[in-house]
């Protein structure tokens, strides 16, 4: 499809391989556009040239079907209609992503289906559909180039070996095209091209460019640099490389899956005593309820947002496992001895809500220590007593409640990549309010059991995984 364009492409691609801006370029596999019918070949050829040109203008290295043919043969022919294409080809070529395009007629317009792939999956990363009106072919090519930049922005840059190999394949393809074309127009056979050694990519000098100029064409959003823009401007680094290396959190939604252990007031104890008359009607009632210390497991989810690199805020919705223990007793009003007993402990779940603000003193890099503060609310349900029937005693149920608290702590985040990290943290919550201690209601009997004694706090050790979207 690209016979006549081959000679002109040789000069452009050689410039990309030698010039400094090409250092930020990424090899991109672009198979020939698949036409929907034989009448669409000319349109596919024209769009192929324009898309390739726009991707090259963005500083990337385009591997076409011709350049890849010495390695993968005809595996990329009609790629959009072949199951598994271009997955197998990506495993053999020095490109991390591929863009596959299929076109068809829609009356006077052209419909285009554009899919992006990477070497890690047979399925498309993303598929977009475009309606190309007459005269809008260049706009479509720019849209595809922007999609390529967005796809590459959060991926690890290509290695120097990949860039060298991509340039070598392209130069070999263009040399073959030149050898096929020159004999038809020149009286003497052209001498064999002298093999050239691919130029080692050199870092692009960004010193004199503004912040907006550095980001132009890379697909990296400005919000990723909030709170660390000055650090980036001093780095003289391509924005995509800087985002990958710094693991910046800015401008992202944050989701965490959390689990660990808590040491503190995680169990509840209640005591209920009643005095009845001869008709088994309650004459007086008394109950007390409060927390006691016990180490228990906990889990939760955190949803937040990082407006700047060094700070995020959000809400933790947690489940705290615990146990409830109940003792009951009754006597008749003319008696002095209480008939009391204690039931076996039962499992209980409490809901912990925490609004928190987290600060990263070291905001860039793989390892990020952090501290946080927060406000808490713990919700626990009431005790449900199964009343005896012989004799029938009506025990009042100790009510549930809410306990407020204040929290603080710190930990360490290890960012394995730009969008995922693993963390461990320690936390301390001080509980306040009436239900944070033992509370009672009613007339206390002389032989009442002692009140439950909590410690007034919960200390936790939590670990988990963080995703940034």
Image (cartoon, helix red, strand yellow):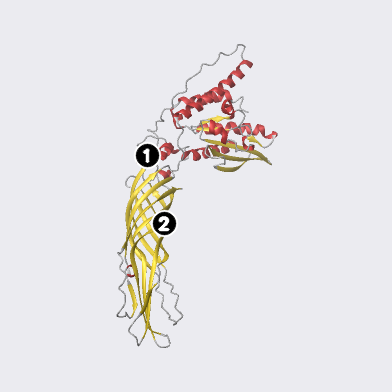
Of the 4 image quadrants, the one containing the N terminus is top right
- Dot 1 falls on a residue whose secondary structure is helix
* Residue 363 appears in the rendering: no
- Dot 2 falls on a residue whose secondary structure is strand
- Residue 324 is tagged as none
Q: Residue at x 41, y 27 (%)?
A: 202
* Residue 6 appears in the rendering: yes
**In the rendered image of this protein, does residue 337 appear above or below residue 372?**
below
Residue bearing mark 2? 299
- Comparing 352 with 78, the one in front is 352
Residue 10: x, y in percent?
54, 24
- Comparing 60 with 449, the one in front is 449
The tag earlier along the polypeptide, 2 or 1, is: 1
Residue 424: x, y in percent?
36, 50
Q: How many residues crowd mark 2 within 10 Å: few (<14), some (14–19), many (20+)?
A: many
Q: Residue at x 35, y 41 (%)?
A: 230
Residue 363: x, y in percent?
35, 45
Residue 47: x, y in percent?
60, 34
Measure the alpha-carbon separation of dots 2 and 1.
Answer: 37 Å
Residue bearing mark 1? 232
């Amino acid at each position: 499809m690209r016979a006549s364009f081959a000679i002109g492409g040789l000069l452009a691609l050689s410039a990309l391989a030698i010039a400094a801006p090409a250092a930020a370029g990424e090899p991109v596999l672009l198979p020939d556009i698949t036409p929907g019918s034989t009448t669409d070949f000319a349109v596919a050829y024209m769009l192929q040239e324009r898309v390739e040109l726009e991707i090259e203008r963005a500083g990337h290295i385009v591997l076409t079907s011709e350049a890849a043919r010495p390695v993968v043969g005809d595996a990329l022919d009609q790629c959009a209609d072949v199951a598994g294409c271009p997955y197998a080809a990506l495993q053999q070529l020095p490109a991390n992503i591929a863009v596959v395009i299929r076109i068809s007629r829609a009356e006077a317009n052209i419909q285009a289906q554009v899919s992006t792939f990477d070497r890690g999956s047979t399925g498309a990363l993303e598929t977009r559909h475009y309606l190309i009106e007459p005269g809008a072919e260049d706009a479509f090519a720019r849209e595809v180039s922007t999609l390529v930049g967005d796809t590459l922005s959060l991926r690890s840059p290509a290695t120097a070996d990949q860039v060298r190999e991509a340039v070598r394949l392209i130069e070999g393809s263009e040399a073959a095209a030149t050898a096929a074309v020159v004999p038809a127009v020149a009286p003497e056979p052209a001498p064999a091209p002298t093999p050239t050694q691919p130029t080692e990519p050199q870092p692009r000098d960004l010193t004199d460019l503004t912040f907006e100029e550095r980001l132009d064409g890379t697909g990296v959003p400005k919000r990723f640099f909030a709170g660390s823009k000055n650090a980036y401007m001093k780095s003289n680094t391509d924005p995509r490389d800087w985002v990958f290396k710094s693991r910046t959190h800015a401008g992202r939604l944050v989701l965490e899956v959390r689990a660990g252990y808590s040491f503190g007031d995680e169990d509840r104890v209640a005591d209920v005593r009643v005095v009845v008359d001869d008709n088994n009607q309650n004459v007086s009632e008394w109950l007390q309820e409060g927390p006691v210390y016990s180490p228990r497991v906990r889990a939760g989810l955190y949803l937040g947002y990082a407006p700047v690199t060094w700070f995020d805020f959000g809400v933790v919705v947690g489940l705290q496992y615990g146990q409830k223990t109940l003792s009951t007793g009754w006597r008749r009003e003319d008696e002095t001895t209480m008939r009391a007993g204690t039931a076996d402990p039962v499992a209980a779940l409490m809901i912990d809500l925490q609004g928190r603000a987290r600060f990263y003193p070291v905001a860039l890099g793989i390892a990020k220590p952090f501290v946080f503060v927060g406000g808490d609310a713990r919700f626990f349900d009431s005790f449900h007593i199964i009343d005896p029937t012989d004799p029938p005693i009506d025990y009042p149920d100790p009510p549930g409640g809410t306990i407020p608290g204040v929290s603080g702590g710190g930990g360490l985040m290890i960012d394995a990549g730009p969008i995922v990290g693993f963390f461990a943290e320690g936390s301390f919550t001080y509980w306040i309010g009436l239900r944070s201690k033992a509370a009672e209601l009613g007339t206390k009997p002389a032989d009442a059991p002692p009140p439950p004694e909590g410690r007034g706090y919960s200390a936790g050790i939590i670990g988990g995984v963080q995703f940034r979207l």
